[in-house]
Amino acid sequence: MPLRRRRSHYQQLTQFERDRVVGLCEGGFSFRDIAERHGRNVFTVHDCCQQWSREGTASRRPSSGRLRGTTEREDRRVRRMIVAHRTSSAAEIRVPVGTTVA
């Protein structure tokens, strides 16, 4: 099957899964056993454990690209305002929220 159809190869590990992988590595499980438990590639598990041993953290590195314009909290506030005032324009929502709304 072409890789284009099988997108499971490109799924990122969540922070919870990364912590579980590290815990199982420290518990003495092999990379293959951990990969089978999580349904991931052995190399993904290996890289996660290697990063833990090298850096002491299993968090994802910041990706390249455009920086966020708003924080998660501001995003939630904008969504709340949109739901509460469905007919308001972006300019009207921008004033009470205090951020740029597109």
Image (spheres, rainbow, N blue to C red):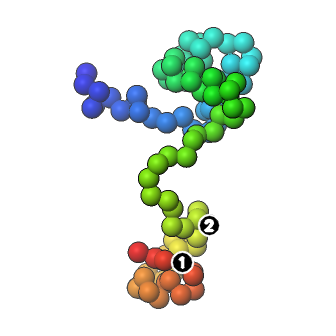
Specify whether residue 20 is in view. Answer: no
Query: In this picture, is 27 found above or below 56?
Result: above
> If the image is split into quadrants, where does the N terminus sit?
top left
Residue 73 numbered tag: 2
Specify whether residue 51 is in view. Answer: yes
Label 2 neighbourhood size at 10 Å, few (<14), some (14-19), many (20+)?
few
* Quadrant of the rendered image containing residue 98: bottom right
* Quadrant of the rendered image containing residue 5: top left
Label 1 neighbourhood size at 10 Å, few (<14), some (14-19), many (20+)?
some
Q: Which of 83 and 99 is in front in this view?
A: 99
Q: Which of 66 and 49 is in front in this view?
A: 66
Q: Residue furthest left?
A: 2
Residue 85 appears left or right of 50? left
Q: Which of marks 2 and 1 is in front?
A: 1
The x, y position of residue 45, in whole percent, is 57, 22
The x, y position of residue 95, in whole percent, is 53, 87
Indicate the secondary structure of the residue bearing disc 2. Answer: helix
* Residue type (three-letter) at the residue carrying disc 2: Arg
> If the image is split into quadrants, where does the C terminus sit?
bottom left
Query: In this picture, is 102 found above or below 21?
Result: below
Residue at x-position 74% and y-position 19%: 26
* Quadrant of the rendered image containing residue 31: top right
Total marks placed: 2
Residue at x-position 63% and y-position 28%: 51
* Residue type (three-letter) at the residue carrying disc 1: Thr
State the separation of the CA atoms marked 2 and 1.
Answer: 11 Å
Residue at x-position 68% and y-position 19%: 25
Residue 37 numbered tag: none
Q: Mark 1 points at which residue?
A: 99
The x, y position of residue 7, in whole percent, is 36, 32
Residue 47 appears left or right of 87? right
